[in-house]
Amino acid sequence: MRLSAQIIQSAEQRTNPLGEREIILRSLAIPAIEHLAVSRDQFDTMDLSNNHLQRLDNFPKMERLATLYLGGNEISYVDARNLKKNVPNLNTVIMTGNGVKGWNVLSDLGEGCPKLEYLSLVGNPITRRQHYRLYTIHKIPTLKVLDFQKVKQSERERAQRLAASAAGAAMEADCRLEARAAASSAADDGAVTSKSYNGDNETNTFEPGEGKNAEESFATQFTLEEKAQIREMVANAASAEEIDRIENLVKKGIFPGKTDNSGSIPPPPPPPP
């Protein structure tokens, strides 16, 4: 089930025992993070447990969000740039029982979550790798609790010694290799296979028309300036219905400009020469 604007608006919202505003989006078979802008950054905690998420990415600006519950998903990829830019105040990430197996994910968590203090990766394949705990402490120096166990000063010292050793250098080399492999895989997943060409000149042409989904149409049918405008429209949408209208137009390859007095949608601007 896609994480639609309607689902977000109708989800359970509560004040949890810690006094934080929390939204419950668990056990909905959600495959990907999307449309969270409709939440208007009103929550301290978000529960996305027991879904089918494979990637931790695509967050809109959510400076209030501090805690993510992600247990029981299939996450194996973390977009450090997206987290650092849009969710800069993450303090707690619970990823128990996911698919994390590469050192690069720890590096991405450290880079993307500069305020991260509480992390759980219990039940992930990476926890079976040698020096997992020390390497995690080294890559995420802000951690206070890892896998529900307090990080001790002696562990920080051992982590520093590991990082300076030959074994640490080998782990860093593995991390770089795994990061490249993950980047290549992510690029393949997001690659657009259908392209239009004008004769023998390999220049992308603008051909409005319904794609397989809104994501494909967004990637192929709009210029960079139009994409930025569409993102701003979604972020400033006043209702779930408005977001759905924008998405439906994007899927059809139509620039979702504001309606005129007659209710019609103005045509998209012409493509650049």
Image (spheres, helix red, strand yellow):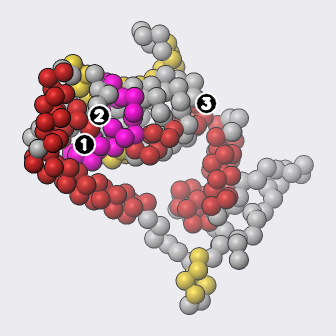
Task: Give how far across and how far down residue 128 sits, in percent.
Answer: 11, 39
Distance in Å between CA atoms under marks 3 and 1: 30 Å
Identify whether 264 is placed above or below 49. below
Residue sitting at 17 percent across and 41 percent down? 163
The amino acid marked with disc number 2 is: Ile
Residue sitting at 75 percent across and 70 percent down? 270
| Residue nearest the observer in this picture, 153 or 67 | 153
- Numbered disc 1: secondary structure: loop
The amino acid marked with disc number 3 is: Arg
Residue stretch rendered in magenta on the structure: 93-118
- Residue annotated with mark 1: 100
Task: Give how far across and how far down residue 82 sits, in percent.
Answer: 46, 44
> Would residue 127 appear left or right of 228 to someone viewing this image?
left
Distance in Å between CA atoms under marks 2 and 3: 29 Å
Task: Give how far across and how far down residue 76 sits, in percent.
Answer: 29, 46
Identify whether 93 is placed above or below 125. above
Quarter of the figure with the C terminus: bottom right
Residue sitting at 19 percent across and 28 percent down? 156
| Residue nearest the observer in this picture, 200 or 14 | 200
In this view, the residue farthest toward the bottom is: 200
Q: Which mark is residue 140?
A: 2
In front of the other: label 2 or label 3?
A: 2
| Residue 68 figure quarter | top left
